[in-house]
């Protein structure tokens, strides 16, 4: 795999989830990423990736035969409608409800929804309220 361009945030370089059923995870995350407007970066028979998230089977060389366990991942949404669409797509593609769309008490304007992926990872999509961004991401090219 040869990557010519990356988009990076400020803290996380990447996350890898090692899953039991790669096809089920591909359906789930494919639907979620479609809603979020994040394209798949690539895939093979034992992994796929989008942005900073890599999802692989236990058979992949990077996984060394071990599942990663349960994690909480939060993805950013552009608006409340995107949060709502995430929740519908997640449930329609193998996810389990873990918190319907709504405001949360974390800070004013925090609007989020939660779904468990096919391996029980807690996936959140959050809209933090109206704000201006200096850039959509940091663009790195090689």
Image: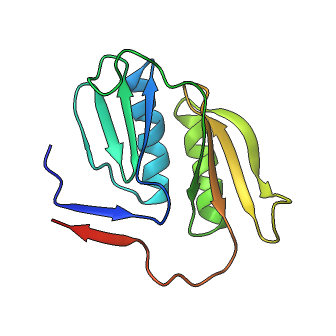
Residue at 48% over, 57% down: 36
Q: Quadrant of the N terminus?
A: top left
The spot of residue 54 in percent (x, y) is 37, 40
Q: Is residue 131 left or right of residue 32?
A: right
The residue nearer to you, when weighing 22 against 93, is 22
Q: Is residue 111 above or below residue 52?
A: below
Tell me where residue 105 sits by quadrant. Answer: bottom right
Q: Quadrant of the C terminus?
A: bottom left
Residue at 37% over, 18% down: 58
Residue at 36% over, 29% down: 56
The residue nearer to you, when weighing 97 against 126, is 126
Q: Is residue 138 left or right of residue 28?
A: left
Tell me where residue 60 sits by quadrant. Answer: top left
Instruction: Tell how many labels.
Output: 0
The spot of residue 79 in percent (x, y) is 62, 69
Q: Is residue 53 above or below residue 6?
A: above
Residue at 61% over, 26% down: 120
The spot of residue 51 in percent (x, y) is 37, 54
The residue nearer to you, when weighing 127 against 91, is 127
Report the colour scheme.
rainbow
Q: Is residue 127 left or right of residue 137?
A: right
């Amino acid at each position: 795999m040869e990557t010519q361009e990356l988009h990076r945030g400020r803290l996380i370089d990447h996350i890898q989830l090692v899953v039991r059923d790669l096809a089920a995870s591909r359906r789930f995350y494919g639907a979620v990423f479609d809603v979020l407007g994040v394209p798949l970066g690539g895939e093979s028979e034992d992994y796929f990736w989008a942005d900073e998230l890599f999802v692989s089977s236990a058979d992949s060389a990077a996984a060394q035969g071990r599942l990663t366990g349960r994690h909480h991942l939060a993805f950013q949404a552009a608006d409340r409608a995107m949060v709502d669409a995430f929740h519908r797509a997640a449930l329609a593609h193998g996810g389990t409800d873990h918190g319907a769309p709504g405001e949360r008490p974390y800070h004013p304007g925090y609007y989020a929804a939660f779904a468990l992926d096919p391996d029980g990872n807690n996936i959140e999509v959050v809209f933090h309220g109206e704000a201006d961004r200096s850039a959509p991401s940091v663009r790195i090219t090689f």
